[in-house]
Image: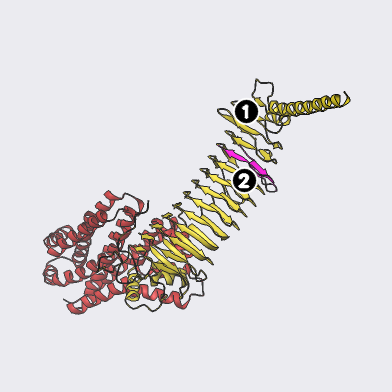
Chain colours: A yellow, B red
Amino acid sequence: MKKNSLKILKKYFCFICLLSALCILGFNFASAKIITVCSDCEIKTIKEALALSLDGDVIVIKEGYYKENNLLVDKSIKITGENKVVIDLEFVNQGFVIKKENVTVSNLEIRNINVNYIQDLSAIRVEYTRGCTIENNKIYNSFFAVYLAESKDCIIRNNIIKGDAKSESSSGNGIHLWNCSNILIEKNETSGHRDGIYLEFLKNSKLNGNYSHNNLRYGMHFMFSDSNAYTKNVFRENGAGVAVMYTKYTEMRENRFEDNWGPASYGILMKDISNSIIMRNTFYKNTTAVYLEGSDMLQITANNFIENGWAMKILGNSLNNTIISNNFEGNTFDVSSNSTRNENVYQWNYWDKYEGYDMNKDDIGDVSYRPVSLYSMLIEKIPESIILLRSLITDILDVTEKVLPVFIPETLVDNSPRMIKYKYD
Amino acid sequence: MIKKIFKYVVFELIRSRIVWAYAVFLLLSTLGLFYLGQNSSKTVISILNIILFIIPLVSIIFGTIHLYNSKEFIEFLLTQPVDRKTVYWSEYFGLACVFSFVFTICTGIPVLIFNFSFTSIYLITSGIILTFVFISLAFLSSVINNDKVKGIGLSIILWLYFAIIFDGLIMSVFYLFRDYPLEKIIIFLTSLNPVDLSRVMVILQTDVSAMMGFSGATIQNYMGSFTGKVYAFAILILWILIPSYISYKIFSRKNF
């Protein structure tokens, strides 16, 4: 009898344990609630909703105009807008500050972020966390728009970011990442900032299909950001183009660098970049399409250089780069260098200025081509001589140098120039 | 009276085959460049090269030869009651106007049709000014030399000087004084050559000027401003007036 009752007691205990476990689980399920915010709802402000929410909740903001700022998100929630939700920061403070993992912010329009010289005020700021998603937002009149600091595994996608930058010193960046890793930045449009996309200490990330244009300084600017891939981005009409520095293992494919035209504009300026791949990009109408300074072991392959001032400016401290199978067409100068030595390899490129012949019809010219003209060397040495641009004497100099090369680097030569243009599109 | 002689000069020139050849050459090269090049603003730059090369050459050589060839006509005119001033200036304007007219029709109008822009207007203006400048120089060299061969030789040397040698000298100046700031000196030096001056003025109008870097920006500041343009224009006009006036002075005292 005693034994039996003990058994029953055990059974009961087990049952109760199970029940309570179920209860706890069930309670948790019930708690993943949807909080709706609108002007006629019970909850009228986003701040209230944020205060009421718990991990796993969804905050749905209905169409309307919300004058709020400093929205601290410290729970793992989803914040999403329905139709046109405008959050006006009225030039005070910042917008969303995300400090918890797995937060989603989507479909919102955030406006009017204040310019501040002490804090980097931003529309959406993510700090010390992981797994955030920032999607389909429109951010207008921003100082900084999307700012990620020390975060991982985030997605920034389909955002339209428009700033109203007047001067470099009083403006911020569109997408600003500092010390992040494993981030996907995709299909965003940034304009009117100091730098469209600014990356510092970013690792293992991907940037695809972004469009950065009409920014005051750079379309994209990164430093110390190893092992990232940049694909199918477009950088157009930025004050100084794209500048990248102090980075290894970068891959840039199928990007377009266009219309970066001005006395200090570059398609892409590379300083201390090494072991990277630059492939199938198009450089169109830039003052200087590619500028290499202290950059080593780059594979510059299958790119189009069309109608640039200088297709490539390679300083003497850039070594062991391979420039292979590119198209050079309609550039004022193809390659220029400040050094009389050459440590880079040029091969199988198509040069529209090439005047050689092809006897055996293998599409490879039988005479080698020297892409550096004497005049372009002269400009590197004496910048004032640019005043003689398009004068007869420079043509004469170039022709004599072509016939009898003395000054231009002896090894800077494409020994197998291609006769017909490659078709990369 | 000046009108009458002017008319004779013009009619005589229109009958000249060289003027027609010049017209056909200008027209064909302009149209050819526009048809071959896809980018019309770059084509304008290529046309600039033709203008800076061909116009001075043809104007100065043809101008010199023309004056020698019309020596008998001029001598005949001077036996009549016509003063030398009239003869000289109607010869000068006859030649310059015909050449500018040919240039305007054969290069100017196609350029304006294919690429109507400020650059094109500058291009055409500088073409016309260069025609006048080099015909002035042609008259000068033929007036100071009685010998035809010497006169043509001097003209060729003058052309070589303005088209090539001067730039070579500028380049050596840059090289010798490369440690000094040269921006202001550049502007002074370019004023000494009408070809350079008009080239710089046209290039500053195009987007190629962005390639000119720091020294280009300084030059743009001086020459691109309104005063700079007025200055350049005034210098170019001086380049027309001074040689033609000197040669007129010599012409009016000359023994035929």
Q: Quadrant of residue B234?
A: bottom left
Q: Amino acid at mark 2?
A: Asp
The disc placed on residue A60 is: 1
Indicate whether residue A317 is drawn in magenta: no
* Residue projecting furthest to the right: A2
User: Residue A282's x, y, as percent?
Assistant: 42, 54
Q: Is residue A90 above or below residue A40?
A: below
Q: Is residue A283 above or below residue B154?
A: above
- Residue drawn where x is 21% and y is 79% of the image: B150
Secondary structure of the residue carrying numbered label 1: strand
Q: Which residues are magenta?
A: A111-135
Q: Which residue is more in the foreground, A115 or B150?
A: A115
- Dot placed on the residue nearer the N-terminal end, 1 or 2: 1
Residue A263 in view: no
Position of the N terminus of chain A, as image quadrant, is: top right
Secondary structure of the residue carrying numbered label 2: loop
Q: Which residue is more in the foreground, B196 or A188?
A: A188
Q: Which residue is mark 2?
A: A153
Q: Amino acid at mark 1?
A: Val
Q: Badge 2: few (under 14), some or many (20 or more) residues near its Cα, within 10 Å? A: some
Q: Are marks 1 and 2 on the same chain?
A: yes
